[in-house]
Amino acid sequence: ATLAAQPRWRAAEAEGRAAAARVRQATWRQIGTLETTGLYTPMQRPLSVEFPGIPNLVPPMSFEVKQLQTYALSATVTQPLWTWGALSDNRAAARQDLAASRQGIERLRQQLVLEASQAFLVAAAASAGVRVAEEALAQQQAFARAARSRMEAGAAARLDLLKAELAVAEADSALLAARNRERLAREALFSLTLDPRFREARLRESGDAAAELPAETE
């Protein structure tokens, strides 16, 4: 999700495509260029030439000269013979730029994967912390109910009930703090993935199975 939606990743890919295009352009400059020109003049009027003639020798006359044909096509090939290494150096620099761009893209990919993985694990741990805090609150509420029943039965002092109610308040406060941490962790994960599902969906804990510890002699 991060690689699909991150603007930094899309910008890096666009820069890589631009670097590849610069390499192709530098290669074609070294090979040469081919230019073609086409012209279509169906309604062109011919040029009329009038000759006044020479008195008593040549009578006057007129004729038409057609300047262009209806279809005209020309081609020009330019081949650089010697540029004192400018074109080859430009091509080499473009290739180095492309290699650096590809390395930058790979580094950014690894960085984004690392950041997204860290953000996911932090959010998953925060979600698990909320569930633990909820269970702790339920447990303290059960202790408070038991303390109230014992006090009403005369088997416990009121101080025990006050202590149990204080533990319930502390567990409630801890649950609120855990929910705040989870919200912050989910927003950090959303800022990387730009996927709104990470704001509400249940995060499945994942990870490699813990390897067995080596023997003490090893």
Image (cartoon, rainbow, N blue to C red):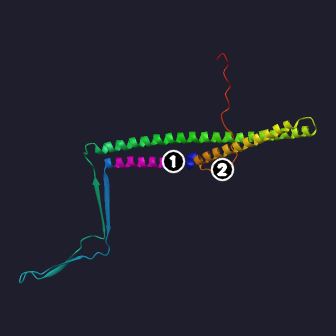
Q: Nearer the viewer, residue 47 or 159?
A: 159
Q: What is the residue that sits farthest to the top in this orientation?
A: 217
**Residue at 47% in and 41% down:** 104
**Residue at 19% in and 78% down:** 63
Classify residue 101 by image quadrant: top left
User: Label 1: few (<14), some or many (≥20) within 10 Å?
Assistant: some
Q: What is the residue that sits farthest to the left in this orientation?
A: 56
Query: Bounds of the magenta span?
Result: 10-28
| Disc nearer the start of the sequence (2/1) | 1
Judge whether 47 appears above or below 194 on screen: below
List x then y, in percent, for residue 46.
Answer: 25, 76
| 21 inside magenta stretch | yes
Q: Which residue is mark 1?
A: 8
* Residue 197, numbered label: 2
**Residue at 53% in and 42% down:** 109
List x then y, in percent, for residue 197.
Answer: 66, 50
| 12 inside magenta stretch | yes
Q: Amino acid at mark 1?
A: Arg
Label 2: element kind: helix
Q: Nearer the viewer, residue 31 or 50?
A: 31
Q: Is residue 119 visible?
A: yes
Judge whether 24 appears above or below 48 on screen: above
Q: Nearer the viewer, residue 189 or 136?
A: 136
Q: Amino acid at mark 2?
A: Arg
> In this rendering, would 16 be left or right of 147?
left
